[in-house]
Image (cartoon, helix red, strand yellow):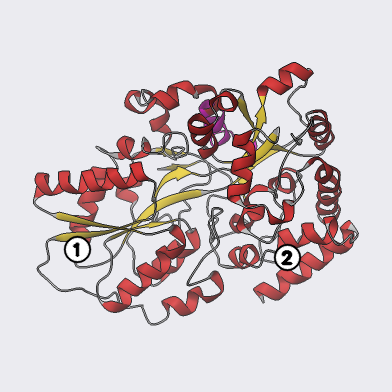
Amino acid sequence: MKDTGKNSGQSRLITRRQTLQGAGVLGLGLALSGLAAPAIRAQGRKEIRFLNCETGKDTLAFFDRIAKEYQEKTGIEVRVDSVPLGEAFTKITNGIRSGTPYDVANVGFIGHVLLLADQGQIVPLNELTDPYEWGNNILFPMDDKVYWYPFDYNLSVIYYRKDLYEKLGLSLPDTWDQFVSNCQATIEGRRKGCIFPIGSNGATNWMSVAFMWAEGVKLFDDQWNVTLDAEGMKSKAAAYLDFMEKLYPTMPPGAIQADYATVLSNVVGGTVAHGPYAGRVLEAAERDNPQVAENLGIMPYMDSAGKNKAVSHGYDGWVVLKTDNTGPAMEFMRWMTTDRLVDFLHTAPVHFQPARLDIYDNDQWRSNPLITKYGEQIETMRKMVTDDNLLVTSIDTQGPAPDIRPGKVFEGFVMPEMLQDKLIKGMSSTEAVEKAAARMRELIK
């Protein structure tokens, strides 16, 4: 087993794609209270219950196909239920409470993995993860035990228009000032320089804060003290707000209402020259705007001095629950994560960025037409999860260890409101940082 990244013990509680619906982070302890003794469902049912949260049509078709294949192979039925990721944890806990738990479940929040492991509801998966090398900051081991099988990264990176850079003679920016200058230079007619959300939503949490990580801002110290307004840290956070104030005029109007779909449509539609997102941008552009697709490049977030780079973390994975069916479920997962993992990743070939490093050199995986076509961009994303000099982190993976406190800050939209205090309300950068730090202390006390 290799988890080569910095902060490999950190956790993630809220997906960047959407905030929790149903059981929120603030109520996770309550949602799991009383579940210390795993529920056992009726004996004698030769069936594996699988909760899937990847609802693209190709992915749904994949699970339908392999369920039939596995039953023909083993005689064991695999029943796949598919729900949006925001409903997953509620489904998992309701299943446990009702005595009909899922055997395998898709999770996108390491905080959920932590809570389920603490309550004895899931089993370690080291036998599945140990044989492979993994990208940076993805396994999140707890006492050397890995409780989930991460199948992809969902890193927020910055997309830019290579054709505009060539036409205007622009170079890839290493500093905030250079990035602002490039965004200003690419404004023409209805096309704006960039879009970064600033509303109180998950999109802002995921897409707009990584400039701050590159600058060296940390939200907590090793003792879980809030450090956002600490000496030496407050000035960095304030500088980030000053930078965003310069960047804001290059954005389309209504950034405070921007969400995931807004950013995706602007980047794919060519109405902005720069915008954040994960690999899904290339798949959407290939389908809806091929001319833009072939001109999209990828860069990390940068700092003010040209010294450091960062990307905003994101990921998904599977857990195996402790039920009377754990043995068969593990056998199914062993088969799916070896014989059928590449087929699964191909259902969203660019968006499902592999967490397992051997996949990048797998001939079957590389043979996919989209992976071949966007090989340059994929290689850039690969370097982002293997380069120890590039920081892979996010609001909810801050702090010294797996914990729900960063998730509370994420769900409380502290960083988005800090941006709004500066950009919309006209508050001074220092005052906005101090207010955000006070709000963090209130949330985690």
> Is residue 130 in sight in this rendering?
no
Hey, which quadrant is residue 395 in on the image? bottom right
Q: Which residue is mark 2?
A: 226
Q: Position of residue 139 (x, y in %)?
A: 45, 49
Towards the viewer: 371 or 116:
371
Q: Is residue 271 above or below residue 228?
A: above
Residue furthest bottom in the image: 34
For badge 1, the amino acid type reads Asn
Check disc 2 and report its element: helix, strand or loop. loop
Q: Is residue 169 above or below residue 141?
A: above
Asked if marks 1 and 2 touch (Cβ < 8 Å), the reply is no
Towards the viewer: 424 or 37:
424
Position of the C terminus by quadrant: bottom right
Position of the N terminus by quadrant: top left
Report if residue 355 lies within the magenta region: no
Report if residue 388 lies within the magenta region: yes
Q: Which residue is mark 1?
A: 325
Instruction: Tell me the magenta residue range.
Output: 378-390
Q: Is residue 109 above or below residue 41?
A: above
Is residue 336 toward the left or the right of residue 441 in the image?
Answer: left
Hey, which quadrant is residue 167 in on the image? top right
Is residue 296 toward the left or the right of residue 316 in the image?
Answer: right
